[in-house]
Amino acid sequence: MDKEDILQLLKKNALFNEWYSYVKDIIESDEFQIRKLYLHHDDSVYHHCISVSFKSYMIARNVGANKKNCAIAGLLHDFYPKAWQYSQELYEKYPDRLRNEKNIFHMHGFTHGKEAAKNYQKYYPEVVNKQITNAIKWHMFPLTLVPPLYKEGWIVTLADKIVSFTTINIKSVPKLVGLKKTIKIKKHI
């Protein structure tokens, strides 16, 4: 059973349906669909963000936080404009979507939250609010040093760590945070 089959199965679940009602329009948008081509650990940004979104929603239900804001912030927490990891398919379809700079002050772990917060406001202005923006911007705490201001941000931060640690290969951490070089993209002549 693949991930799409699991999504179809979950649609029969009441909790899933409530969560999905909050995020459906974003998930189905063309811009979010492109995240299927952005690599994230051993998966895609698309699937990672769906997992973080649902986990954030479930945690919010149990602690009395804003479920909708947690679901949306979880979905968009890694909605950065350019991919950090090379993907042949992304390079072939959207070569302008790959990040080229490797400056230590612009490493993924330190900057992508701010980039995602800015990018989601561009594509989804109808869902912008201070809780969602803050959760997306500071979800990498303690790496960013600035903690989330609202409990919804803490929930997204926690959900992201839980989901990431269940899918990450520990040997790839230096590469993922920008401390180790990745494959260089060769320009086609």
Image: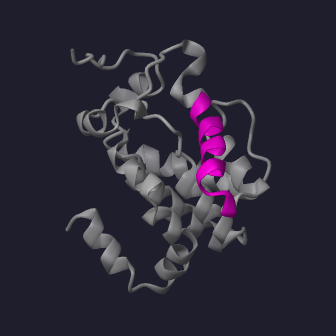
For the stretch drawn in magenta, the main secondary structure is helix
Residue at image location 60% in from the left, 16% down from the top: 105
The answer to which of 31 and 147 lies nearer the viewer is: 31
- Name the residue located 33 percent from the left edge and 36 percent from the top edge: 169
Residue 54 lies, in percent from the top left, at: 50, 65
The quadrant where residue 183 appears: top left
In the picture, residue 189 is in which quadrant? Answer: top left
Residue 165 on image: x %, y %: 44, 44
Name the residue at 53% across, 61% down.
53
Q: Is residue 153 above or below residue 29?
A: above
Residue 39 in the magenta stretch? The answer is no
Instruction: In the rendered view, tell whether residue 55 sits above or below residue 78.
Output: below
- Give the image location of residue 180, x and y in percent: 40, 16
| Residue bounds of the magenta highlight | 111-126
Left or right side of 84 for 21 = right
Instruction: Specify whether 129 is left or right of 122.
Output: right
If the image is split into quadrants, where does the N terminus sit? bottom left
